[in-house]
Image (cartoon, helix red, strand yellow):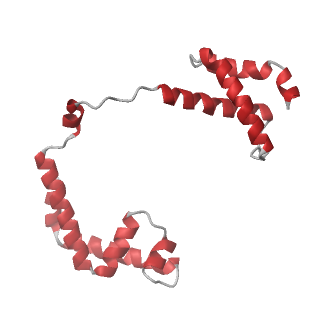
Amino acid sequence: MRHIFKNLAWRDLVYNYLKQRDGAQDADDVFQQAIVAFDRNIRMGRYEGNSRLKTYFLSIAKRIWWKMLRARKPQLEFKPEYEESTTESIEIQLIQREQKLYIAKVLSLLGDRCKKVLQLYQLDYSMEEIAKALVLSNANMAKKQAYRCRNKMKQFLENNPNWKTLIN
């Protein structure tokens, strides 16, 4: 492993990359840490041969430097004015509450099965997971059920245009 690093080109590779990004002062530290990580990765079989060794080494050095930069960023101090700037107005909170209540009412009118399907669908569950939760035979059945429930909800909303007042 040592023969690879006899050539200073790898150190220069790291130095040049960091120099272009105003990080030249970190080059020696990053290079040393990258050597250790590179050696460990090779020994543990993490290098799969999908790239040249130099490219792999530089990617390790980049990650090390990015972690160093992230660790240096000062943490924001909590100040009351931050909270005030992110707090939504009472009107917006009331509108959002009305929207949630309306959607909950619509879901309850569609039935428990559709309510569960649409909730799982909204939470980005896969069709396989939805099928399992609803004790359906397969993912295609869950897909059909989700399609039917979405259409039911769409039909309900089209037949009850008063929901649009909650959006604006």
Q: Classify residue 54 as left or right of residue 138.
A: right
Locate the N terminus and report the quarter of the image it occupies.
top right
Residue 68: x percent and y percent?
Answer: 55, 28
Residue 22: x percent and y percent?
Answer: 56, 16
Q: Classify residue 8 as left or right of residue 167.
A: right
Of residues 79 and 13, the one drawn nearer to the viewer in this rendering = 79
Residue 18: x percent and y percent?
Answer: 62, 20
56 vs 114: above or below: above
Visible residue check, residue 158: no
Q: Residue at x 85, y 21 (%)?
A: 6
Visible residue check, residue 115: yes
69 vs 157: above or below: above
Q: Residue at x 47, y 78 (%)?
A: 131
Of residues 161 and 65, the one drawn nearer to the viewer in this rendering = 65
Q: Classify residue 105 as left or right of residue 15.
A: left
Q: Residue at x 52, y 26 (%)?
A: 69
159 vs 27: above or below: below
